[in-house]
Image (spheres, rainbow, N blue to C red):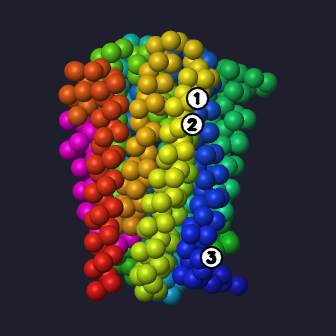
Amino acid sequence: MKTINKAVLTTGNVPRQLFYLALPMIAGMISLVIFNLTDTFFVGRLGEEQLAALSFTFPVVLAINSLSAGIGIGASALISRYLGEGNHYKVERLTTDSLTLGFVFIFTISMIGLLTIRPLFRLLGAEGQILEYIHQYMFIWFFGVSMIIIPMIGNNIIRALGDTKTPGMIMMLSATLNIILDPMLIFGLGPFPELGIRGAALTTVLTRGITASVAIYVLHFRRRLLNFKVKKIKEIFISWREILHIGIPSSTIRLALPVGSGIITRLLAAQGPLVVAGFGVATRIEFFALAPIAALSSVMGPFIGQNLGAGQVSRVDQGKKVGEIFSFAIGAFTAVMLAIFARPIAMVFNDNPRIVETTVLYLRVIPFSYGFAGTLQISSTILNVFRKPYHAAGMMALQVFAVYVPLALLGSKLFGHFGVFSSLAISYIISGSISSKVVTKQIEKLKE
């Protein structure tokens, strides 16, 4: 019997609905961060060089994740709107075609990645033994990239249906398996060989492979949304074009972050690998701190899309305002907590004074701009659902390339890495404020 997927977010109390949608995703996002922090923790036990190597991989891994996330974001934005309109055939078609598009992307990126590991990371400033550790990690990572990307696309689709519990559970499963397997494969516990930093990469591929299978199972057997019978091959290309219309600018939005991170990593590399290691630790801790805001942003897309498709513009407006209030409340609480506990948190991962001081400085400077960072995320999500992906891309370009990078280049010369970190906070404040006003104008146009 075929499952009928219906819009479930077009009625009810908006603040309560967003809160309960976000709760499972907060657990899922925290689990995803724990996944990354687990790698950082155990690799940090291997030594400073291995920890620096893992930090160097961060911009590249984030860049590839950002490109693939564009496919999921594009599919999710479209599926939520078509679900609100009641067009079930398009929901089915877009679900299937987004996954096939994902596999095409995966094959391309893995081939390019395997051939460019050493020159790419030399460009980022890695050398010597650190470069060797990077090669060990990324060689395995690129081979298993399909296992990493498919769950990202699948979870975006499931969220578009208004189901945040299933993606949250999938992410929690991934983190649990990672915690179990990481020390076994890195240090060679029990029957497993000691693989060092290779073990961290292999664990990532294995655990994500299991969650990829779960996501596919949910979409095919529970939701009945995978249909590979195509009346005309042209339909696939129409779906791909629709997805990429939103997905390419969305990928550009997300790609701006790792590109900016790569530039910043290169700036910090001039101050030594321990500063890079501290920066890497801080950004992973930051992912944990930003998990509630990221969760809120992830559920805004389905909420806005279903209500927009159903013509509920007043709920769209209310959802945007409630989301921003939540973002600033969460950001303020997080900033205070990190200001108090930055040092003991940093020392959990490594006790080298240089690494700890860099991590603590980051965690005491950046978090006071988190409310604006959340507003920027929410605004970008809404603009994508409005099919204004280039507006969203423009906001992120403003944040990274017009404000963050230029200020960081200047700040690095004048104040060292304190100047670099302050530049990021300033960029969030400016771009978050502007993006909120842009979305407000778009909603006003819908009301006219």
Q: Secondary structure at mark 3?
A: loop
Q: At x 44% / y 25%, what residue is drawn?
A: 361
Query: Amino acid under label 2?
Result: Met
Sequence-wise, the earlier of marks 3 and 2 is 3
Mark 3 vs mark 2: give the one in front: 2
Task: Determine which of the numbered discs, if any, sits on residue 224 in the image.
Answer: 3
Answer whether labels 3 and 2 touch (C-beta < 8 Å): no
Vertical arrangement, residue 121 with respect to residue 305, above or below: above
- Asked whether 413 or 137 is in front, the reply is 413
Sequence-wise, the earlier of marks 1 and 3 is 3
Q: Can residue 47 be seen in this snapshot?
A: yes
Crowding at label 2, few (<14), some or many (≥20) Cα neighbours within 10 Å?
A: some
Q: At x 53% / y 12%, what residue is drawn?
A: 352
The segment highlighted magenta reads: 385-406
Q: Position of residue 15 (x, y in %)?
A: 56, 69
Query: Amino acid under label 3?
Result: Arg
Residue picked out by circle 1: 341
Q: Can residue 116 be seen in this snapshot?
A: no
